[in-house]
Image (spheres, rainbow, N blue to C red):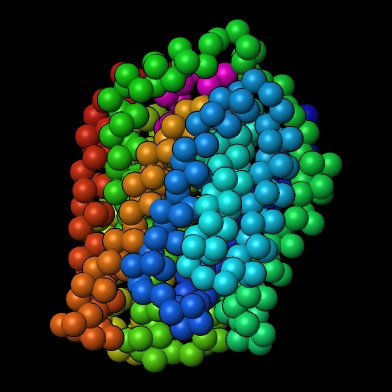
Amino acid sequence: MTQRYRIVVLAVLILAYTFNFLDRQILGILAGSIKKDLGLTDSQLGLMGGLAFALFYTGLGVPIAALADRWSRTWIMTGALTLWSGFTAACGFAGGFWQLFLCRMGVGVGEAGGVAPAYSLISDYFPKEQRARALAAYSFGIPIGSALGILFGGLIAATIDWRAAFIVVGLAGVALAPIFRLVVKEPPREVAAASVPATGGIRKLLAKPSFWLISLGAAASSVCGYGVAFWLPSFFERSLGMGLVDRSLFLGSMTLVGGVLGVWAGGVLGDRLGRARPAAYLLVPAVAFLLALPCFVLAVQAKSLVLAFVLFLIPTGLNLVWLGPVITAVQHLVAPSHRSTASACFLFVNNLIGLGLGTWYFGAVSDALTPIYGTEALRYAIYSGLGFYVVSASLFVLAARGLKHDWVP
């Protein structure tokens, strides 16, 4: 296959991942409107943003990835894109907490088949010396999708209402699905997947200490990363008095610029440093998280919007440096025939803890502190969660020490 076709495929995969995170993160910018319309608490919003999505997203991810190691990854991703986009549109018709909760669970069911197969596809399309950058480029879908979810969600909600925002972005994803299937072809696998039992590959992976240290380290960072990303729109509304349109433009541009720079920097550093020393794939994100912590503390204290933009821009980027290097490290813990399954096992731990706990944690702490701090409770909830970065950095450093032993060339 030509390098040009590889780039086209990567671009379409990025577009699909953009819709993945657009549909996943749009709830954050719409949280204030939904809370008022449906009479919800911060804890309920946190459950919808995290646990409702994470339950099936994590639970179905491993069996779907095992299927992807033996069947067409492109067909699985096409069906997944159609399903999660359809449930996103259905969110616009929810009349209460439980209806919206169930629709978000449906989004999680669909997205369970959207990421791990893509990691495997990219690893088969690109040679190993380009994988960290290719996986980092694929991860552009996270900041782009999050930014567009904030921007389009906020603007559509301000112009029409929050229900229309869900419906419009959901139907756009459904329209993308057939285009995805036409463009992305199933590449040859490096090793015939059917020759190695899936259960044997999973057992070998789970027996490696570095897998658990990497997964738990990523999960600890995701508690803070997902949690802060979900609640920042509400923080800017309550503590800085920003309107819906202003919040959408402010946070959307901040997420896009900071996120893209952070993801790409992680991929470049991972390829350059990890080539000679695999431990660098984990030491790079460990340093990034330790630098992000004080930046977030200063950013939350900022009173000026200009200063807040600059201070939030830096940790927004540092928060996503880990994606390319860490995902590359996970891909090299197993043989090529088990990459989808390995990615799904990693995502299971990362998202069940990080996504499932993160948004709920900040919402629950905010509810608990509201009698003391009033509208400023969310500010102190964010402070309390930044310690997860220290936990994450520590686990990555420990994993780096044993990564060479578990590495599969």
Residue 377 screen position, x and y as percent: 24, 79
Residue 209 horizontal side relative to residue 139, left or right: left
Residue 363 horizontal side relative to residue 365, left or right: right
Q: Which residues are magenta?
A: 329-339
**Magenta stretch mostly in which secondary structure?**
helix
**Residue depicted at x 20% and y 65%:** 384
Query: Does residue 210 sit above or below 376 in this rendering?
Result: above
Q: Nearer the viewer, residue 8 or 86?
A: 86
In this view, which residue lies farthest toward the left?
372
Q: Quadrant of residue 120?
A: top right
**Residue depicted at x 61% and y 65%:** 91
Q: Nearer the viewer, residue 334 or 5?
A: 334
- Asked if one can make out residue 360 in the rendered structure from this viewpoint, the answer is yes
Exactly how many numbered labels are in the figure?
0
Q: Nearer the viewer, residue 194 or 13?
A: 194
Q: Quadrant of residue 172?
A: bottom right
